Structure formats: structure tokens, C-alpha cells
Image (tube, rainbow, N blue to C red):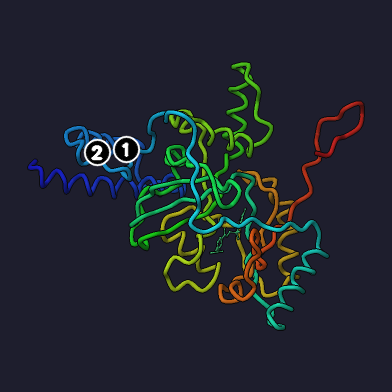
Amino acid sequence: MTDKEMAQRLKELRETIDFYGYQYYTLDKPTITDYEYDMLYRELENIEKAHPEWITADSPTQRVGHKIAGGFKKYTHDRPMLSLGDVFNDAELMDFDRRVRQDLDGEAPEYVVELKIDGLAVNLIYEDGSFIRGVTRGDGTVGEDITNNIRTIRTVPLHIDNAPPHMEVRGEVYMPVRAFEALNEQRREDELEPFANPRNAAAGSLRQLDPQITAQRKLAFFAYAVGGTIGMAIGSQQELLQRLRDFRFHVNPESAVFTNMTGVIDFIHTWDEGRRTLPYATDGMVVKVNSFAQQKRLGNTVKIPRWAIAYKFPPEQARTKVLGISLSL
Ligand SMILES: CC(C)(CNC(=O)c1ccc(Oc2ccccc2)cc1)c1ccc2c(N)nc(N)nc2n1
């Protein structure tokens, strides 16, 4: 093959491998066998070995980097990563709805309701469609640069087609329950302290200085927001979630839209039961005004939006009985 043909083949292989990886990890619907995938991947590695000058950070071969010297660098988010106010019962949800309708001069907004995944909020920065930096939420303004660890998460796209020049995608890094149980099984065998819950396991895995270890922890990512507008005509949270799916992000499939708070409350109660069968841990639901125009009118305080609220589920009833008294954590 001439260099020109090889460079062309490299481009095809990257696109093909990205696509099959997306089908396998994000859609969970592979259309080729693992063997066929491995053959394509090996062909790409061989071309990059022959031409290391052609290797770019968003190549599928660059997911697992090397240990960084020293600790994680601090990074300031371009736009704040807002956190959420909490409510704990139906009456408080009704209060939220009343306040929103008041501030919208009597308009009754549509609400989007999303699961609140029990993981860590992160900010993913893309320039011209390439993933260039991953940052923890931190205090909402300054977080830690954990790019090399985020890169190991297979459901985080390293390259996005037709993306705007600069885009910040927010979402939750989490550890699926089965990966959590297998990890703790292994830690008990190695006489290491098991993690208390999937959230702590995800946090501990993201804080590894060696990405080779993070890569073994089977972390995953759900996208749910962007930092500010992404320069595209998107009018609502529902449209944004679809746009994120179009960009091949894994967006949690359980969200729904309601025209009143009664529907929201029913939906939340069905998930307070249903969530126990999910393959990932949740600690609540997030209720958001759907329209971006109405979100803008409602605005946010320094730290939290006035157009969104987190409904927190009661903590799991501890199963362990101590001296015959059941502990609720
Ligand atoms: C609503 C938002 C706070 C994200 N939104 C933002 O972070 C955000 C940040 C700046 C924005 O625009 C601004 C631009 C400049 C200044 C201020 C805001 C808009 C949204 C949020 C937080 C946590 C969530 C969670 N755990 N689960 C789900 N499912 N959704 C969640 N949604």
C-alpha cells in the first residue's frame, strides 16, 4: 500500500472501530463478532506502529494512557457546573411547581424528569469534535483534570462528528452494580477493604493516578447537560438529550416529559420501586423545566438553577441488623 492508501485506510479503520465500539458499549447491540472487531483494531495498531506520526489523541488506540507524575491539576470550568436543590416529598415538589408557575407569570411549564444516577458529575470538553479534557465537578467552578482516566471509559466518545467548535458535555460517571459487586469480590479475595457503594467505587477509580487501573474498573457515563448553549438551535432539555444521543453519547433512556407536576409525582413513585432492578445505582430523580426559554427566564442563583430540582429517594433501609435494631443509613 502507498502511504496515501495507508492514510486512507487508517481513517476508515478509526471511523469503523469507533462505530462498532459505539454499537457494542453504548447501544449494547454489536453487529460484528469480537474476532472481527479485534482484527480491525490490530490492523489500525499496525498502521499506527508503522506511522507513529499519524497517531492522534482521539484514535481508539489511545484510550489507556500512562501514569501521570504528581497529582491531578486543577481546572476552572468555562461555565459553572451548577448543583441542584433537594426536595424529599410530594408537598415540596408541589411547592417547587407553584414557585416556577409564579415566576413564569402563570404559565404552566412542561417538565422533563430524569433518573439521578449515584455517581460523580464530570465535565467533558470537546474542541472541533475531539475529546480534549475531562474535569471533575469540584466546587462547581474549579475541578480536577482527570482526562487520562475519563479517556478509558468506553461510553465516552473520543471523537464526535458534526460537533460545534467548542462543547462542554456534563454527565455522571458511575460504576454498574455488577462491576461493583465483582470488584468488591476481588478486593475481599485480595484482603483489601471493599467499597461501601458504587459511588465510592467510581470515585476511587477516577482518583487512580494510573489509567491502566481505571481502565480495569469498567466505569460508564450518562450525559445529561451541556455547559451553557452549544451554539445550536436547541429549544428544550428534551431536544438536548436527543442531540446528545445523535452525538453518540450514552443518554439514560428512562427520562419522560410531563405537562403537570401530578404526572411527575406518579412517575417518581413508580421509579422509587422500579429503580431496584436497574443495573446502576440511583439516589433520586431530577425534575427540569423543559423549555430553555423558560429556564432562561427563571435563571439560576450562584450555585443552583431555579428551573430544576432533585427529588431524593429515602436512603436504603440497611439490611444488617445490629443488636436486633435495623439501621437506616
Ligand atoms: C441541571 C444540571 C445542574 C446540569 N446543568 C448544568 O450544569 C448547567 C450549567 C450551566 C448552564 O448554563 C449557564 C451558563 C452560564 C452561567 C450559568 C449557567 C446550564 C446548565 C444538573 C445537575 C445534576 C444532574 C444530575 N445529577 N442528574 C441529572 N439527570 N441531571 C442533572 N442536571
Please give the name of the residue rendered at 40% of the width and 46% of the height, measured from the top-left corner: 30
Q: Are marks 1 and 2 in contact (CB under 8 Å)?
A: yes
Viewer-closest of 82 and 189: 82
Q: Quadrant of the N terminus?
A: top left
Between marks 1 and 2, how big is the CA–CA gap? 8 Å
Q: Secondary structure at mark 2?
A: helix
Residue placed most toward the observer, 67 or 19: 67
- Where residue 88 appears, as percent x and y from the top left, is 79, 56
Quadrant location of the C terminus?
A: top right
Amino acid identity at mark 1: Thr
Quick check: 242 left or right of 320? left
Q: Which residue is mark 1?
A: 61
Where is mark 2, residue-wise? 44
Residue type at mark 2 is: Leu
Which residue shows up at 57% across the image and 34% down it?
Answer: 179
**Vertical comparison of 81 with 39: above or below:** below
User: Where is residue 235 shown, x and y percent of the image?
Assistant: 51, 74
When the figure is inspected, residue 54 is found, relative to residue 235, above or below; the finding is above
Which tag is nearer the camera, tag 1 or tag 2?
1
The answer to whether residue 245 is left or right of residue 63 is right
x 67%, y 67%: residue: 306
Picture coordinates of residue 244, whole percent (x, y):
46, 60
